[in-house]
Amino acid sequence: MPPAVSIVIPAFNAETTLPDLVSDCLAQTFRSIEVICVDDGSDDGTRACIEELSRKHAGIRALSIEHGGPTAARSAGADTARGEWVIFADADDRVDPAWIESLVTGGLEVDPLGKADIIAGANCWIRGDTEQKKTDVDQKRAMSEFRGLFSRGSRMDEVWKRMLGCAEKDASISHSMCDKLFRIELARSVFKGIDRSIRIGEDTCFNIIAFARARAVALIYATGYRWTDTQNSLSHTPQLCALQDNRTVYAHVKKELLAHGYGEYAPLLWHDWMNRLVENQLWWVCGDKETAKQLAVRFMASYEEAASE
């Protein structure tokens, strides 16, 4: 019998962190899973590590590709997945034992008829400061109040506001691919149209397109994914490279939103979110907020040009 959920882990030079994550996945309380580890052309011992893990554990499948970045690795994993649902985890992160079960159980509670193509939970970050703990409590309260099944059409308006950060003091939806279950057919269709060269913003690009194509989305509060900030993380990619990738992401996303009937409001919401992101990245580069704001206007003009090509 095929597994219900496929966990895809793209791994590049992750020989020191991958075993811990795999151990976490094997300890899941939801047992109908498979773990697909994709070596993304590593030049350390990652490939050998994956092959050894797959020999020791029947539930682990090994895959190796030429180095192409996280999108290429995730896509390769999704192509070979046998589960009805797929979820992604980064090789330097950790997950709680109930990570998958909380998503599956929560999804069934709000969507007993199985209409949703996405079951979205809430990302949980490893931080010890009081302010972050308060944020986590607020997010749990807000997501619990907002939980439900949201079908394609006008009802998705509320989802887009939370996805794009335009709903003040309300439940936000993270852009992570690691706190959501995606129907495998949807995930594969999204990967087919995404530029494989994107390395920063790839989660955002995938999520926005997936939400635009989904028949329905189940929103719940289900945590358990533990993001860790390591030195080799792609989040530390130079800001100028991130700005270049943002241009590609914006072009992909705007076209998809227009194509799937969200043209009345979603591009404007997306523009607002992207503009704030670009300003912050430029501020980091030039060190002056006013200069960053002026430069952001030029960057956004080029993004609009790319989106209309």
Image: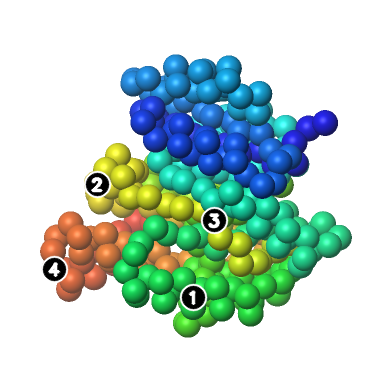
Q: CA distance from mark 4 to mark 2?
A: 17 Å
Q: Quadrant of residue 77?
A: top right
The secondary element bearing badge 4 is classed as loop
Of circles 3 and 2, the one toward us is 3
Q: Is residue 149 visible?
A: yes
Q: CA distance from mark 3 to mark 1?
A: 14 Å
User: Who's the residue at 60% across and 41% down the image?
Assistant: 27
The secondary element bearing badge 3 is classed as loop
Residue 187 percent location from the top left of the image: 65, 43
Disc 1 target residue:
137
Of the residues under marks 2 and 1, which one precedes in the sequence?
1
The secondary element bearing badge 1 is classed as helix
Q: What number is the disc on residue 288?
A: 4
Of circles 4 and 2, the one toward us is 2
Q: CA distance from mark 4 to mark 1?
A: 34 Å
Q: CA distance from mark 2 to mark 1?
A: 32 Å
Residue 144 percent location from the top left of the image: 63, 75
Disc 3 target residue:
224
Q: What amino acid does circle 1 point to?
A: Val
Q: Is residue 203 above or below residue 68?
A: below
Of the residues under marks 3 and 1, which one precedes in the sequence?
1
